[in-house]
Image: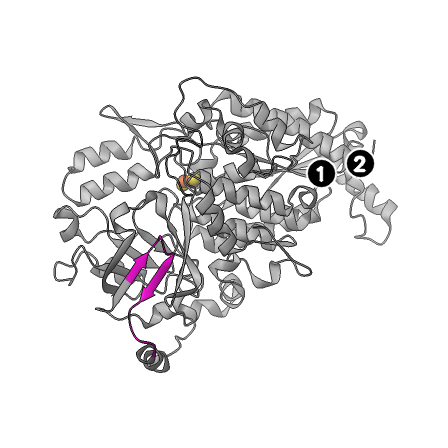
Amino acid sequence: MTSGLRKGLTSYGDAGFSLFLRKAFIKAMGYSDDALERPIVGITNTYSDYNPCHGNVPEIIEAAKRGVMLSGAMPFVFPTISIAESFAHPTSMYLRNLMAMDTEEMIRAQPMDAVIVIGGCDKTLPAQVMAAISADLPTVVIPVGPMVVGHHKGEVLGACTDCRRLWAKYRAGDMDDAEIEAVNGRLAPSVGTCMVMGTASTMACMIEAMGLSLPMSATIPAPHAERFRLAEASGKVAAEMAKTKGPKPSELLTPASFRNAQVVLQAIGGSTNGLIHLTAMAHRSPHRLDLAAFDQIGREVPVLVDLKPSGEHYMEHFHHAGGVPKLLAQLGDLIDLDAKTITGQTLREVAANAEDVPGQDAIRPRDNPIKTEGGLAILHGNLAPRGAVIKQSAASPKLLQHTGRAVVFESVEDMTLRVDDPDLDVNSDDVLVLRNAGPKGAPGMPEAGYLPIPKKLARGGTKDMVRISDARMSGTAFGTIVLHITPESAVGGPLALVKNGDMISLDVARRSIELLVDAAELERRRAALKPADAPEETRRGYAWLFNETIMQADEGCDFDFMQRTGKKTETG
Ligand code: FES
């Protein structure tokens, strides 16, 4: 057998001595020569006490190691950064690229023939796949899996669509302190990722459809025994990949597989974040996403998966209905079923093996979709020259065409201070505008795009308003919310020019978002704009790197120096 231990033996200018030294040190851990002569599968460890979504990572690692060893290879576990959505300051997005760099460099730096990346909480899978694409070593992805659902007073609960819905109810005065406390203990009843079609589930589904993980890997609930059997099976596949040196991400991630991911993103009513992450992943490859082509896919692909926040069910229901393989079968010719997976199977074979579950209603047939169009639409207009996105499947139909008066918040802090002010001049037909919350402005593009309905309006019964920003939104959120306005206001995008009282027109059918102010006046306002000073904290370290090199949302918010250079192909 060939040992992965021989990889990269250049440190001392004498390969023989380098291997001698490497073996001498690793033997301190009790390894035999037999173990060390085998192909090596590296396994990332993203367990952290700060990351409850990754609470089952130790068990997944054990199962994956078992699979690797059963197939005659040697597993080596190594730590990387772990990012948990609700604990990362200023935002998890701020840290995604750091995790991608950490993961890529540790894959490159350490000897291994294949790698298993284990992640799940929103930014972790995209970071790991971005790293895998750049390192281009045979890679198996094991998502940690979604939480099981919670229950409250006979109602099924899920993080975090119901977190937002019930918090809004509490804000509106329709729920008391004791009940919201009880709900707080029931929203996340197990380890695992949010069990609605949030960003974590969206990424896991797209990655499964891109062939980077085993069938059903996106949907098996995190605590189920099946998840650990999947991890063992993934370990076996990784061992074979280590022996045969393939397939590498560059062999699997073709324009067809990127297009398949976009079809799945639309069909699951997936998170708007999924679009940014997929764009970033493409930028690490020779391929590029085209927003117009993505929007066109959305016009042709219906939403078939009935999950919150676009529909009714939760990830475990999707799983028991047949998961991604069943969805691929239902999508049929909308997907390129010849695309390959890590096992060598095509998606056609994966779809053919999908379980038929009589009576299930979580995955709809194409002639009875949840929505006739895909979940996400791309908007353009004088407010968003390079585009903006709306999750139309989770919006209020009556607001999809709406004109209203702008109520402007200068920043997330300003919004937090003033949105509930009883004297705020706002009514339910207005358009709430948040700026300086983009990739550079905030920084890290917080998930602040789901602006809360001002308390006085919520108490009056307002459930939704048109809200627009250069921020992101949690995939678990719902409402008529325009996000990722590009270019962002902090780099001089037109959002910076909006004034209180301006009229803003949204027309999703026409894919337009317009500021109804004449061009000459906008030019006057632009001339009066003063560039903001870079904050003190951006003068050194990671904050400096981020501030200097972060790209806009339509480019995936990666660092400009991390994208792959050279010839590019469109994937739409
Ligand atoms: Fe980790 Fe939702 S908070 S996936």
- The amino acid at mark 2 is Ser
Q: Is residue 37 left or right of residue 305?
A: right
For residue 37, say whether it is visible: yes
Instruction: Tell me the tag on residue 17.
Output: none
Q: Quadrant of ligand 1?
A: top left
Q: Is residue 118 left or right of residue 254?
A: left
User: Taking 534 as reference, is 566 above or below it?
Assistant: above
Q: Quadrant of residue 61?
A: top right
- The amino acid at mark 1 is Pro
For residue 46, say whether it is visible: no
User: Taking 165 as reference, is 464 above or below it?
Assistant: below
Picture coordinates of residue 201 (x, y %)? 46, 37
Query: Which residue is drawn at the image coordinates 41% and 43% (left, top)?
Result: 373
Q: Quadrant of residue 348?
A: top right
In the image, 507 versus 238, the foreground residue is 507
Q: Which residue is labeled 2 in the image?
A: 3
Q: Is residue 246 left or right of residue 436?
A: right
User: Taking 428 as reference, is 245 above or below it?
Assistant: above
In the image, 120 versus 466, the foreground residue is 466
Picture coordinates of residue 14 (x, y %)? 87, 51
| Secondary-structure class at tag 1 | loop
Instruction: Tell me the tag on residue 247.
Output: 1
Q: Residue furthest front?
A: 367
Picture coordinates of residue 443 (x, y %)? 42, 61
Q: Identify the magenta region.
A: 505-519
Q: Is residue 34 magenta?
A: no
